[in-house]
Image (spheres, grey):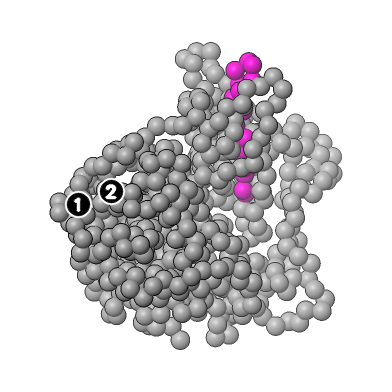
Amino acid sequence: MPDTPHLIPPSRRRPRNGVRAVTAVAVVLAVAAGGSYAAGLGPFARGDDGPDPAAMKQARAFLADWAAGRLPGAADRTTRPDTARDVLRSFTAGLDIEGPRLAAAEDAEETEDGTVTVPFTAKMPITGLGTWTYESELPLVREKKGGGWKVDWRLSLVHPRLSDTEKFRLEREETTPPKVTDRHGTSVADGSYPSLTPLLGRLADRTGGGPRGAVQLVDRATGETVRTEASFGERPDPAADDRPVRTTLDATWQAAAETALARADGKNAALVALRIDNGEILALANSPASGFNRAASGTYAPGSTWKIVTSSALLLKGAVKPDDVVDCPKYLTVGKEFHNVETSEFPGATFRKDFTESCNTAFISLRGKLDEGELGRVARTYFGVGQEWHIGIPTYDGSVPVPKDETEKAASMIGQGRVQANPLIMASVTATAVSGEFHQPSITAGNEDGTRTEPLPDEVVTQLRELMRATVTDGTAHVLADLPGEIGAKTGTAEVSDDQDNNGWLVAHRGNVAVAVVVEEGVTGGGSAGPVVHSLLSAVPEDPS
């Protein structure tokens, strides 16, 4: 339900001579464009870690604004707002960057003059080509008036090689449009499926038919290339034949997915539908359709959809049964105050009721039933989360770090803390939960599969299916109750930050298909992602061919 940041531990940095090393919590500040940003541990856990909370908060806020496209806001956090606004705009637009992901590092450094330097990693998705990744640093200085912190503006903080004499230029090469078909041989490269357009090059890379280009560092005065900063795409193999790349997609499902995302009311959103029996992806869609692939590469707190994994961990060791009474109070304090959506409560509720109504406090109260790191081990061992997936296009494969304290352990029970996923992962989690067996998702055939998982016991699968079915018939996923077929589902509401609405999630299964949808700032899962899933399942057969 409520949401927290994605933490990526960077390599340790040695303090420079004459500086004092200080440590701050690493926080991913952007997930896709307008994605999940947060400080602390969600609605229930406030406060900043680190030796200088005000400086670190300003650094995180600057990167979050930049990543979300709030460039005036980012610029206002610097010592030179007008210049910063112009440079950030020209850098992002000029290089066709959409949905930057910016992660503050774990180590900051404070010099003797009081400047705090915060390293960060930038992942810049360049439309139609790929992601340019590099590292830079944010210098922060204290204002003379008021004592607040500002980012000390300089070109090199955008990129270390950006300067008064050198800038970057994007160069694209003309290439032959790739030939890509669905599982039945129907072309999906004719523009009828907008979400696939940015992926076609990736799908065709194996034949050398994808787009190519480069980010060049050039001299501002002469325009001459100084160096190639990043290259994208491969040269075509002269020996390759002209056969199209066949995908696992289904044109009917893909078209329905594209239409369904219109129910997101213009918000950033993503959807994945895949076969339960083998992991083959039937549809993958993003809104907006161009640019960043939120569905497979986004990094989001999954909120209460993650309670499928938490429930699996509890059921596996017999720590709870569906009919056990697990009280659901409005509030529960574990270092910080945790609460339910709209501060709901269900006194004397059974675990089944806690699941179907998505009670945060009940799940958190069971945290002592799991060992440290046990949730992550279950996610990895049974659901493949955090292992390296090879599906045919780039993906983010999830993260469930060992909690650093009891507060973070409490948050991880409800898909918060540092738990990170995306619709691809959660569709796969759903498929595994209701079948008992993990299948590495795929969008093309012949991908390497180095994952190693164990099957869930039949008893656990039966219990999970019953809990998800009850969530549709009697719980928060009732929006799907009028559809044909025995649908099971789980909603999720993930808080982003104090000044942004919650992300809405819904995962579901029917027949041989599992679906996952996230709607950024959708407020609730049932209210935002629910109509998207309803639209999809209304437009497709109960089982794919």
Is 77 placed left or right of 220 in the picture?
left
Q: Nearer the viewer, residue 154 or 333?
A: 333
Label 1 environment density (alpha carbons within 10 Å; few <14, some 14–19, many ≥20): many
Q: Is residue 288 visible in this depiction of the protein?
A: no
Q: Nearer the viewer, residue 175 or 487?
A: 487
Examine the image and state in which quarter residue 142 appears: top right
Question: Magenta residues, as a range?
Answer: 110-124
- At 19% across and 51% down in the image, what residue appears? 327
- At 62% across and 56% down in the image, what residue appears? 127
The residues tagged by marks 2 and 1 sit, at their Cα atoms, a distance apart of 9 Å
**Per the image, is 421 magenta?**
no
Residue at the spot of label 1? 327
Q: Is residue 367 above or below residue 277?
A: above
Secondary-structure class at tag 2: helix
Is 439 placed left or right of 47 in the picture?
right
Residue 238 at what x, y percent from top left?
82, 76
Q: Nearer the viewer, residue 431 or 506?
A: 431
Label 2 environment density (alpha carbons within 10 Å; few <14, some 14–19, many ≥20): some
Mark 2: amino acid: Ser
Examine the image and state in which quarter residue 118 appears: top right
Is tag 2's residue or tag 1's residue first in the polypeptide sequence? 1
Residue 219 at what x, y percent from top left?
81, 39
Q: Is residue 215 above or below residue 261?
A: above
Residue 492 at what x, y percent from top left?
34, 56
Residue ranking furthest to the top: 144
Mark 1: amino acid: Asp
In the rendered structure, find residue 365 and report the number of the disc placed on it: 2
Q: What kind of secondary structure does the magenta stretch mostly adopt?
A: strand
Q: Is residue 456 visible in this depiction of the protein?
A: yes
Q: Nearer the viewer, residue 314 or 124?
A: 314
Please report contact status of discs 2 and 1: CB closer than 8 Å, yes or no: yes
Is 237 placed left or right of 141 in the picture?
right
